[in-house]
Image (spheres, helix red, strand yellow):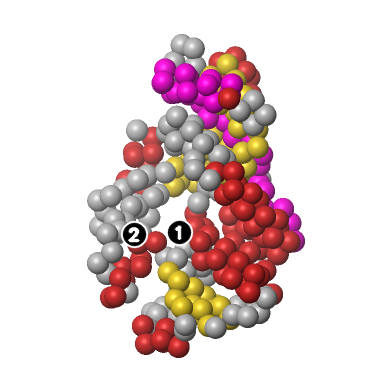
Amino acid sequence: MRIAVIGAGFAGLATTYHLLNYSKAAVTVDIYDPQPIGQNASGISPGLLHPFPGKRAMTPWQGDAGLKATHKLLTIASKGANQSVIAAKGILRPAISEQQITDFQACAKAYPEETEWWDRKKCLEKISGLKLDEKDSGGLYIKKGLTIDVQSYLQGLWQECALLGTQIHSSGIIKVDELQKYDHVLFAVGHAVKQFKPLADLPITPVKGQILELSWPSDLLPLPCSLISSGYVVMSRDKQHCLIGTTHERDFTTADPQPEIAGPKIFE
């Protein structure tokens, strides 16, 4: 059986690995992506991994199963990258409303092995320069939250896929006729799937996300963990830079970076 996977981001590489690993060479898988590994939308992800998302920090359906599967892929990618792909451990979610204070405290009480509530004093002691507007504010500290080195992860997982026999085709334009030779074609390209005529009418709305990379202020201690609030702040591994984001733009005219738009939207 021959399978084509369109897209070499998080979904495409993970799908390819599982297909090859579980089939034990019963299938061949080819990947198609015009961008080099790590240069697509997945490559600019902040790499934040934890089981308490959303404004109310509620655990998602099948969250535990998803985390276990992801941790296995982290181990596999670390092997392929010859280094750990985990950049930092622990995530702090500062509360920015009275409702979040209530929800985060309830989460810490319900999941004491995984989270804890940091009061204002502890948050300010741990995070240099942090500002908390609410009187009784604090933050939900997610003990097992991880920040992934996304570039290392994608490169490492690709190396493991390559060892299992997959090949990548980096042609700029994928011709539908070329895909006819495959028994199955799996699309993992997000909204770009609409570029393929048979799938052009799928009800998918593209959303543009931009992030900023900034030099870390020399008068502030580096963050001991990543921060997630209405946006996020993630330290680089060398502690000299940080990533902050992200925008959620539904009305845009170009997919190219536009810092003059990203800055005001992120800092508003």
Q: Residue 138 vs residue 266: left or right?
A: right
* Element assignment for label 2: loop
For residue 170, above or below residue 129: below
Quadrant of the drawing holding the C terminus: top left
How dense is the environment of label 1, judged by Cα within 10 Å: few (below 14), some, or many (20 and up)?
some
Residue 33 appears in the rendering: no
* Element assignment for label 1: helix
How dense is the environment of label 2, judged by Cα within 10 Å: few (below 14), some, or many (20 and up)?
few
Q: Residue 263 vs residue 23: left or right?
A: left
Q: Residue at x 47, y 23 (%)?
A: 103
Q: Position of residue 175 (x, y in %)?
A: 37, 83
Q: Residue 80 vs residue 41: left or right?
A: right
Q: Position of residue 250 (x, y in %)?
A: 28, 50
Name the mark on residue 128. Answer: none
Q: Out of 261 and 29, give the one closest to the viewer.
A: 29
For residue 141, above or below residue 196: above
Q: Position of residue 190 (x, y in %)?
A: 39, 61
Q: Amino acid at mark 2?
A: Ala
Quadrant of the drawing holding the N terminus: bottom right
Location of mark 2 (residue): 255
Q: Amino acid at mark 1?
A: Ala
For residue 255, above or below residue 220: below
Q: Magenta stretch?
A: 82-109
Q: Out of 96 and 212, give the one closest to the viewer.
A: 96
Q: CA distance from mark 2 to mark 1?
A: 11 Å
Q: Residue at x 66, y 79 (%)?
A: 25
Q: Residue at x 37, y 41 (%)?
A: 263
Location of mark 1 (residue): 41
